[in-house]
Image (cartoon, helix red, strand yellow):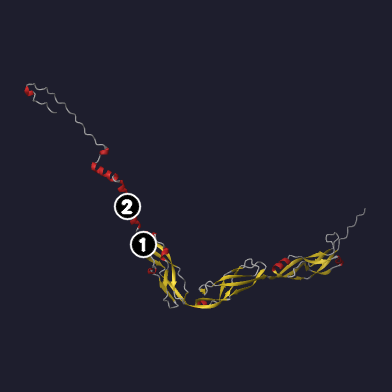
């Protein structure tokens, strides 16, 4: 505490009354708030690192994620594809060995390139056999250099199979017969009597050894289902494996003649009935007869449908009022038999015997 100036005292005034100094109570230091804890520069740096320039920081994050994805997805990977195979060989040769249809490839490259890859870009693997001069069997290697249309940055790491066995034969031509081929059957009661092909022979080509055993080629199937009339149709040809037509699209005409089928059928145990003539069969006193034998065997011949119809007709013997006098032999006939149906009945004649009417019962006496 500053003391009063002594200047006035020196001019004759009495010195001022001095008071005793008051004791000063020390103020305790304020404890720092939790929010203010820690070194100030570090807190300000962390706050700035998080919240300052948010747009620039978001752009940096996007760029970092993009770089990460580009690096992680551009690693080399492998895929498996199938590629068709084409054989190129001399025109005077025939390939008689089995044909390899496709080759399985394992392709390696960056994943981004593989994702855009289409296996159709590879085309076909061409096996160049134009220099083949032998007709024997030999082996042809299948190597990655045969894949000529592989996109950049991709490589073939493996191929299955790695080789194929090939065998040639000398190509020749030959004339062979044409045989009609039919499926199913004509309608019931009808039959195919003739099938005729025009032209009857065609020219085929194939390996010399293969054609030695070939004497004919079949037509495509001609369907006969529910057919009952004669007809003509145009069909292709179906040469056996290893044989081809000189005219690949050649067609032939097939004439099919269909007529009613003729059959012979025998029916046993056919019952014979008596047909009264000139007598009312419904009258109470109409004569009655027995037939011996009661059943006969009948054989019918002719068109199938007519025979089937004739088999349902009745077998009869005719009898009249005069036949009541005694037993006699009578012919068995089939009523309503069509003229196209032949028949034989065994036995042809049966014994017709009248049945005597029962005597009237005596009248009882009164």
Mark 1 neighbour density, 10 Å: few (under 14) some (14–19) many (20 or more): many
In the rendered structure, find residue 63 and report the number of the disc placed on it: 2
In the rendered structure, find residue 109 and report the number of the disc placed on it: 1
In the rendered structure, find residue 77 and report the number of the disc placed on it: none
Circle 2 sits in a helix, a strand or a loop, which is it?
Answer: helix
On the image, the x and y values in percent for residue 241 come to: 51, 72
On the image, the x and y values in percent for residue 308 come to: 71, 66
**Looking at the image, is 121 positioned above or below residue 194?**
above
**Looking at the image, is 253 positioned above or below residue 73?**
below
On the image, the x and y values in percent for residue 121 come to: 41, 64
- Residue 42 lies left or right of residue 188; in this view the side is left
Q: Can you tell which quarter of the image residue 338 is in?
A: bottom right
**Looking at the image, is 8 positioned above or below residue 98?**
above
Tell me, yes or no, if residue 39 can be seen here: no
- Residue 278 lies left or right of residue 235; in this view the side is right
Mark 1 or mark 2: name the one nearer the start of the chain.
Answer: 2
Mark 2 neighbour density, 10 Å: few (under 14) some (14–19) many (20 or more): few
* Quadrant in which the N terminus appears: top left
Closer-to-camera residue (123/145): 123
Tell me, yes or no, if residue 333 can be seen here: yes
Residue, x 27% and y 44% (percent of image)? 48
On the image, the x and y values in percent for residue 42 come to: 24, 43
The span from disc 1 to disc 2 (Cα, nearest Å) is 25 Å
Q: Can you tell which quarter of the image residue 156 is in?
A: bottom left
Nearer the viewer's eye, disc 1 or disc 2? 2
Is the Cβ of the residue at disc 1 closer than 8 Å to that at disc 2? no
Circle 1 sits in a helix, a strand or a loop, which is it?
Answer: strand
């Amino acid at each position: 505490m500053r003391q009063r100036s002594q200047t006035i005292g020196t001019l004759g005034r009495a010195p001022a009354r001095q008071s005793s100094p008051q004791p000063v109570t020390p103020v305790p230091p304020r404890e720092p708030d939790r929010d203010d804890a820690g070194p100030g520069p570090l807190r300000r740096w962390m706050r700035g690192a998080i919240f300052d320039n948010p747009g620039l920081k978001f752009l940096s994050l996007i760029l970092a994620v993009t770089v990460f994805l580009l690096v992680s997805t551009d690693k080399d990977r492998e895929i498996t594809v199938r590629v068709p195979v084409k054989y190129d060989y001399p025109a005077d040769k025939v390939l008689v060995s089995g044909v390899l249809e496709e080759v399985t490839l394992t392709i390696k490259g960056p994943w981004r390139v593989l994702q855009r890859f289409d296996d159709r870009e590879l085309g076909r693997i061409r096996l160049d056999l134009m220099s083949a001069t032998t007709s024997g069997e030999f082996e042809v290697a299948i190597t990655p250099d045969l894949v000529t249309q592989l996109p950049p940055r991709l490589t073939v790491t493996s191929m299955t199979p790695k080789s194929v066995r090939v065998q040639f034969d000398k190509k020749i031509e030959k004339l062979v017969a044409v045989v009609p081929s039919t499926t199913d059957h004509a309608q019931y009661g009808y039959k195919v009597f003739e099938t005729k092909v025009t032209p009857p022979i065609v020219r085929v080509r194939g390996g010399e050894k293969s054609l030695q055993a070939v004497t004919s080629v079949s037509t495509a199937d001609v369907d006969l289902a529910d057919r009952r009339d004669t007809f003509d149709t145009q069909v292709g040809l179906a040469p056996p494996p290893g044989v081809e037509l000189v005219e690949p699209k050649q067609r032939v005409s097939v004439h099919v003649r269909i007529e009613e089928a003729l059959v012979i059928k025998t029916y046993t145990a056919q019952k014979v009935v008596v047909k009264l003539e000139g007598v009312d069969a419904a009258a109470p006193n109409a004569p009655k007869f027995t037939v011996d034998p009661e059943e006969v065997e009948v054989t019918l011949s002719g068109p199938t449908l007519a025979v089937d119809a004739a088999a349902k007709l009745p077998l009869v013997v005719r009898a009249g009022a005069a036949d009541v006098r005694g037993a006699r032999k009578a012919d068995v006939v089939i009523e309503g038999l069509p003229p196209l149906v032949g028949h034989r009945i065994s036995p042809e004649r049966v014994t017709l015997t009248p049945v005597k009417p029962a005597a009237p019962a005596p009248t009882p006496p009164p």
